[in-house]
Image: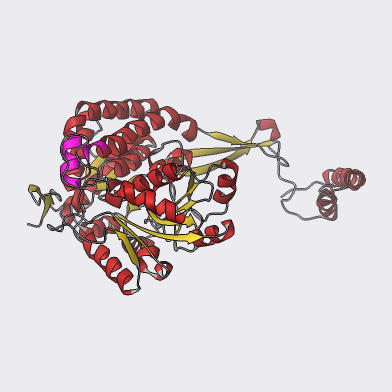
Amino acid sequence: MTVIRSINPANGQLLREIPFSSVEELTAAFASARTAQKSWALLPLKKRAELLIQLRETILNHADDIVKLISSENGKPVFEVVATELLPVLELITFFCKKARHTLEDRRIPLNLMRHRSSILQRWPLGVVAVISPWNYPFLLPIGEIVMALIAGNSVLFKPSEAASSIGMKIQELMDEAGIPHGVFQTLYGDGTVGAELVRQRPDKIFFTGSVRTGKKIMAAASENLTPVSLELGGKDAMLVLADADLDFATSAALWGGYSNAGQACASVERLIVHHAVADEFKRRLLEKLATLRSGPSGPPGSNDLGPTTFAPQKAIYQKHLDEARSQGAEFLAGGEFSEDGRYLKPTLVTGRTIENTEIYNEETFGPVIAMTTFRSVDEAIQKANASRYGLLASVITRDISQGERIARQLEVGTVTVNEVLYTAGIPETPWGGIKDTGFGRKHSEEGLLEFVHTRHIHKPKASFLVFKSLWWFPYTPYQYGTFRALLETYRKSRLSKLRAVPHLLWNFVQFVKNEKRI
């Protein structure tokens, strides 16, 4: 039997072993999910919300255990677990339980020409959705999608990363304790082979967060059955520091934006683009602050700032980028080396004349690494920020908020933060997602919730006495043509031209009615 070995990345301690889900288990899970979803969707939305509010309460009841588990299996400091995993999850549950009704209720579409008829948009659940989540935010990222799926009336098959399987098991336990019905939410365990089988089982939609390489594989496999997908595949996010920036503020933003969660975030600041006039002072201040960061195993709150590399295979990417940058003549201002035990990459800041031609500047490193370059004009800064195959997040640091917004409107990303970094992925009210190789689809907000439903358009008469054969039905007649030709003229810009068309319209219409013989 193949098992997942859940390991504490800070010390190599075995936390537990979890058996892979078999093909037979996946098949059975799909069958029960199909059955359970029908009953779940029939529950009033208010009842589904009550159960999810109970999930929120259950999370709070086990908060300390959850913090300990995430810190142990993922490695991040306990404060980051509370601030960037638990708090956003509680806020997400609260938001969607309050706002889902408004988003999902029927909406009328005002009609212009066909005012005798009515159009309605109806939202209805997709069915069984698959959520395949990563290891870097193993609580926040899956639960956000799971909550949206459940409140919309879907059932969920959840596959956590193999590097976060114990956390995935805890999520299942929390769902069960909160009273989410059996079959509505189920967790499957394993590596990419289990994920591939999950895709082959033909869910109604796949929500994947992870690497570009894996995302392309999922999309290719999903295309065989025309299964829709929502993909968030990472970023190489730029921070633009303008000449007027408060450098104390800017360097603190870069420090947290680039090195929180040991840089293991798709929205991390990985590229710094700093105005040349302030670049030297910016570097000096950033290096001073960088020297204060404490790497190490998580202990009591406040005992460390950076945890270890969570996913061991990621270290090979770090080393490749570091080696290639050195071979290109990059200047390492800090870091660039692993700790003696190999579990931590020292916080790294790299620059140099050739930096923009290196992998460490252009490819997602997904670690505590920032590559820095400079610019002389705003247009140059925008061009450099947009010169990336990724398009998730960008940040602009400036005292001039209006200028920051003008720049934001020209950046080719899904989100731009002005005088802030990273954190908007945890705001439930705002959409999250990207363009280019970052993928497509949105999480959170009304736009994110609509990813979890079908939209049905219903078109009907406003009243039974308004039911008649349409004017464009057979047989076609000269008066019918004359009516519609005159109608075209009513779209002229000139009011006089519009008025001139009215007599022709009315005369042809009257003749048309007199000779009416609709089939």
Residue located at (34% from left, 35% from top)? 88
Can you give x and y, in whole percent of width and height, for residue 163 in the image?
Answer: 19, 52
Color style of the picture: secondary structure
State the count of labels.
0
Task: Work out whether 95 lies above or below 260.
Answer: above
Task: Work out whether 124 lies above or below 101.
Answer: below
Can you give x and y, in whole percent of width and height, for residue 508 in the image?
Answer: 87, 48
The answer to whether residue 294 is left or right of residue 331 is left
Task: Work out whether 200 lies above or below 516.
Answer: below
Residue located at (57% from left, 42% from top)? 400
Question: What type of secondary structure mainly makes up the magenta span?
Answer: helix
Magenta region includes residue 61? no
Which quadrant of the figure has residue 139? top left
Camera-nearest residue between 313 and 501: 313
The answer to whether residue 299 is left or right of residue 87 is left
Q: Which residues are magenta?
A: 66-79
